[in-house]
Amino acid sequence: MDLLFLGTSAGTPTKARNVSATAVLDGQGSGWYLVDCGEATQHQLLHTSLSVRDLRAIFITHVHGDHCFGLPGLLASAGMSGRRAPLDVILPAALHEWVRLGLAVSESHLPFELRLMAVEDFQRWSTADIQVEAVQLSHRVPSRGYVFSEVKPEPRLDTARLDADGVPRGPLWGQLARGVAVEHDGRLIDPQPYLCASRATRRVIVCGDNDQPALLAEVARNADVLVHEATFTQPLIERTGASFGHSSAEKVAAFAQAAGVRNLVLTHFSARYQNDPRRSPQHRRHPPGGPLALRRSADPGAGPATLPPGP
Ligand SMILES: [Zn+2]
């Protein structure tokens, strides 16, 4: 899995950073997923190699505009770019009518099926490669994080089981290895029971706004990557006495280290941090330990942040 940061600014965009959007690329290189879609996310995509045709699903963390105002435009452009495959969008129920009405009154008729799913009822979203679950966070409005887990990464055939079940070697095995169901002796053989992971699965968590990192304690334990907001620095929160439902870099880093998160990526920095590096989260101390990354938005030529190999 790879991550590509399309927007790392909180609340409002800056000249250098757009508002929230993070792309999660699957390990097979065949598709990607979008977490949050701030205004002009589609402009940021133009600086990457990602295509809306390969977009598998969109996950919105909460109703605030810096996380969703880019949705109608991106959907309309996806239609104009020739997308025909249905698109699942998991988002708060309160946004459903807004999306539908925005598309309807602007006469934006999508040539693909738009499947809006309420995050309030969300259990799990999955494909053969990946499964996504949600975790409840704490913010001024209901907010969530999305947990992406690989399913049987780089699958290999369980040859012993195939032999035991009498499935003959040859082309049938080749098809099963590619995940294709085959027919043998008049029965249909599902490939899944014969595929096993060739390495440990990886888990990546991409969070919405959150002022209580401890809510992630269970899902973050030994996660490969935690992407979390760090809107303010701790001294600023202490000086003003207000966090507006956000976390500081120091608070998140301390949590991530205690939880054994292998890689912490901070994002969603207040727009105030653009011109004064002395007040930037980069300059806050963080506990020694695991790798820490602070993200810039995508820029032309910047590659995805490739994850280290799993354990
Ligand atoms: Zn928010």
Image (cartoon, rainbow, N blue to C red):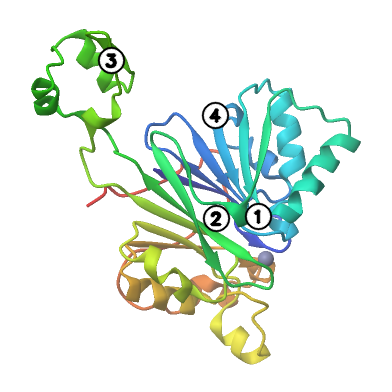
* Residue 165 percent across, percent down from the top left: 13, 22
Label 2 beta carbon within 8 A of ligand 1: no
Residue 208 in view in this figure:
no
- The local secondary structure at tag 2 comes to loop
C-alpha gap between disc 4 and disc 3: 23 Å
Binning the other alpha carbons within 10 Å of mark 4 as few (below 14), some (14 to 19) or many (20 upward) gives some
Q: Is residue 49 left or right of residue 105?
A: left
Disc 2 target residue: 296
**N-terminal label among 3 and 2:** 3
Residue 230 is marked as none
C-alpha gap between disc 3 and disc 1: 47 Å
Disc 1 target residue: 16
Residue 54 is marked as 4
The image quadrant of residue 46 is top right
Amino acid type of the residue tagged 1 in the rendering: Ala
- The local secondary structure at tag 1 comes to loop
Residue that sits furthest to the right in the current view: 105
- The local secondary structure at tag 4 comes to helix
**N-terminal label among 3 and 1:** 1
Q: In the rendered structure, are the residues bearing label 4 and label 2 in contact, judged by CB atoms less than 8 Å apart?
A: no
C-alpha gap between disc 4 and disc 1: 26 Å
Amino acid type of the residue tagged 2 in the rendering: Arg
**N-terminal label among 2 and 1:** 1
Which residue appears at 71% of the width and 37% of the height? 74
Q: Is residue 165 above or below residue 76?
A: above
